[in-house]
Image (tube, coloured by chain):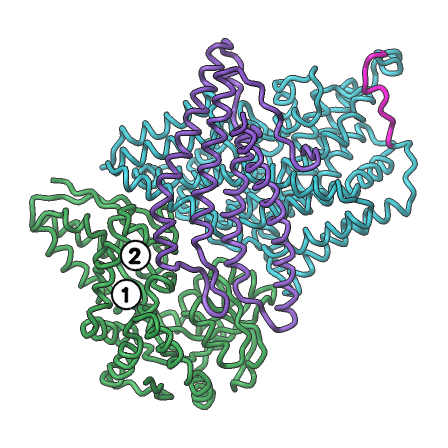
Chain colours: A cyan, B green, C purple
Amino acid sequence: MFDYTTATLVITLLISLVLLGFHVAVALAVTSAVGLYLATGSLRITQAVLASTSAEALRSFTFAVIPLFMLMGEFMGRSGVITDIYIGINKGLRRVPARLAIATVLGNTVFSFVTGVSIASAAAFSRIAYPEMRAHGYDRGFALGAIAGSSCLGMLIPPSVLMIVWGILTEQSIGRLFLAGVAPGVLLATLFVIYIMAAALLRPALVGEGKSEGSQSQPAPDDPLSAVEDTATKPLPPMQLLGAAVGLFGIVASILGGIWMGLFTPTEGAGAGAALALGLAILRGMRWHGFVAAIFSVGRIAAPIMILLLAAALYSRTLAMTGVTTAIRETIVESGLSPYMVLAAIVLVWFLLGMIIDSISIMLLTVPIVEPVAMAFGFDQLSFAIVGIIAIEAGLLTPPFGLLVYTVKAAINDPDVGIQHIFLASVPYWLVMLIVVLLLIGFPQIANFFPNLLM
Amino acid sequence: DNINLRIGSGHPPSVVYAGLMIDFFQAELKSRVEARTDHTINFVEGYSGSIVKVTEVLDGVQDGILDIGGMCFCFESSNLPLHAFQAMLPFGPMNPEVSLQVAQEVYEEVPYMNDVFEDKFNQVLLARIADGGYNLGTSFDWNNLSDLQGQKIAGAGLNLNWLDYAGVLPVQSSLADAYSEMMTNVYEGWIMFPSAWVNLKLHEPGPFYTLTGFGSITWHGLTMNKDSFEALPEDVKPILLEVAAEFEEETGRKNRAEYDRLVEELRGMITVKEIDPQARLDWASALAPWPQSQAEALDAQGLPGSQVLNLALERAEAHGYAWPVRYDIK
Amino acid sequence: MLLIRLSDGLTRSLMVLGAIWAFALCFLILADIIFRALGTPLSGTKELVANSVVIIVFMQIGFAVRSGSMLRATFLVDMLPPRLQRLLFILCLVAGAGIFFFLLHAAITPALRSFANGEFDGEGALRVPVWPARFAILFGAGLAGVNYLILLLAELLGLRLGNLTLWGGFDV
Ligand code: NA
Ligand code: NA
């Protein structure tokens, strides 16, 4: 028997505090302290858990890759490589409908290979792609949906912070997880492109076409976006594009090659990648100011995430100490549900949690409980991991706590766009992710193809 | 009365001793207490590091985060350096039951081994736990020690020294990364027991498993917070100690049976062979000065290092074990 | 006000130091890779990095609080009347200060114990002491608590705090 009162309190208190706008890390820590005290009846033990978790939860080599991969993405962003490649794709797609949105998806796919956090992709493409899509008369929501939706690729295509955390929690190889994400990531990008093209063909107004001539060629004079030039007509010296492509693919190839040849481990690849990206950024003209801004910006973005990780670890220990974790696992295993119903229930829980808390916390809270359950029901371990990552990542697009949506909103600096517009426009991307989840459950080979081929 | 106990380990139940904590220790304790007393026991489980990580079990039990914890002394090199004594005597007995007997006799004769848990860490040592024996798995075939010179081989903690003294390049690693790092040639081998070679699929990147016989080491333990122990009803305490003593023996038996079974399973999959006796002798000779240096370091900390190492050597011999090189500790 | 400026200075410096430290780690890892490839593995890199993670996070925690980077969900709060919004925010700041001072208090004993036992990480040539990370928790939790108090004071007294910019106006 376990204490239902404590368990209920620990869960409802957390949700209430988060909904009431408390800092999520504070809500997690306060709830944990209360729950620990109720479960143990001892202030001394409560304090011991707090202190021990603070010291041990993050004390791992693996967690260092979070800031290091961010640093790599930051240097990459400041080297101008991403902008050049986006323009290159944009030029190449000249005759394709909705080319700017498609270029956003493809650019994001490329950028995903060097960044480990979706937020970095969302922030970068909000600045690169949004002004231009607006200048071409794209529907605001449609443009932002493409940016927010496709930045989810950052977590699916290696390197990925979510995969690192998943690998830590389930004690499986992060290298194999990285490889497992490649095929589903490319599949997801392809489906995004298909959706965009279909939407553009069915409703050309979304991409600024088929409207009355005047509405597009004569934007309101006070519209600051009308000044944005069309990058497809912007001169891009072939050598500059070549340089960008060689730089980016060179770094991706040296990381993958270095891992493959045994020069370093997948986790060490982050350190090597950051150093290489620094070199590239300097070669391409990043100066002292940009360099300092890059390392400060990583500190500013990484620290709150790491604190959240710490607080979530504390909460997950609290759940274990109150016995909730075991109770949930036993309830599921003994429920007599069919494996697919269990899986559906797990995915549903992820979607629902995604509406209120961030992906890494969801992982810390749920993976230790549901992974053994899924393994007990005989699911393939790698595809289950990728299903989990996509399902949780979809939560970044769902209201009310959609981290990617907030990032996009913060980065575009356009007061006319409300959070709700972006959430609404993200729905199709969210549905496409659900389709990929179903495909992975039906065909686990999709996730296993590259790991089996290469490792 | 119902007794609530938080029990756990940093290891998952798939590790033999952690699995036995659930299937044997918890199950037996629960049923015997219910059969023989008016009390019932409810366990709150925290395995796989869900309450404490492998490195924080000793502290966790000391502070009462866990009432009962299973831990490896290998992660306590600053708090319990002497408790890894068998790792300082490589090429010892491979039979976990013999390893356990040696440890039991050493603990019997040197009170510090038991007492330190109560005196310094506010806990009671309930049971000592022997591991399956260590061997060397590699991605390449080898016969002599010279074949290993300059190769990169992974280990963790103290056993990195076994490699270093033999002229092998030691690489610090952890089980979670073993598969991918072997696969991508970050290193070419691992000092590892058969269970990991089978369960973590290390036989794929490492198709050669050489029975080097580094020895089975009794360096896991089951401990209980002292306050929690003292708070137990008087009629429950003897039952708990009785189950713990049986659990101690059971881990030896199960680890021995598992070792034999897994080596057989490996034979069906990859090349498994006995180490060449000369290579074993060469390796042990290369390591000969190391136990002495370990003993000196322990003595310098005020611990009975030389006494314990000498006792362990003698007790193994008393159980009929012949050391390939008889380490000489002053 | 002087105290606030003093605390802000400390918060900012620790953030900068932490950022530089995190950046330096990539060169430590690179050096480790190179030396291992040359057949002379460095020992203790992983332990050094692992302990650095804890220290860096607790060096930067104060800045995260003070600069308002701590993540929160405001969708529901935004729909409430402003007075209630303000009350909830004040409660959030009180809870933040409370929990971090509680952590500060809780971390004292383990930090002293770790220092007294000479607790270290790793084996062999380079043994990385663990106590600096333990003391970083003490210090970081204290600074985070102080920053919550500063925000609380500003909110209660209606003070307008300056933005916390970094060196040379780097507002990232
Ligand atoms: Na990525
Ligand atoms: Na969400």
For the residue marked with disc 2, what is the amino acid?
Answer: Gly
Please state the horizontal and vertical placement of residue B4, each as a whole percent of the image.
20, 42
**In the visual, does A287 lie left or right of B289?**
right
Q: Dot 1: what SS?
A: strand
Q: CA distance from mark 2 to mark 1?
A: 9 Å
Q: Can residue B230 be seen here?
A: yes
Is there CB contact under 8 Å for labels 2 and 1?
Answer: yes
Q: Nearer the viewer, residue A321 or B246?
A: A321
**Which residue lies under the disc numbered 1?**
B129
**In the visual, does B33 lie left or right of A302?**
left
**In the visual, does A155 lie left or right of A357?**
right
For the residue marked with disc 1, what is the amino acid?
Answer: Ile
**Hey, which quadrant is residue A452 in on the image?**
bottom right
Q: Can residue B258 be seen here?
A: no
Instruction: Please give the range of residues in magenta.
Output: A221-231
Question: Taking C140 as reference, is A273 above or below it?
Answer: below
Which quarter holds ligand 2? top right
| Magenta span main SS | loop
Q: Dot 2: what SS?
A: strand
**Which residue lies under the disc numbered 2?**
B70
Q: Considering only order in the chain, which callout, 1 or 2, is on the residue closer to the N terminus?
A: 2
Please state the horizontal and vertical placement of residue C2, each as a whole percent of the image.
54, 28
Residue shown at 47% from the left, 72% from the top = B160
Residue furthest to the front: C2
**In the visual, does A224 lie left or right of A188?**
right
Let me know if residue A223 is in the magenta part.
Answer: yes
Chain of residue at mark 2: B
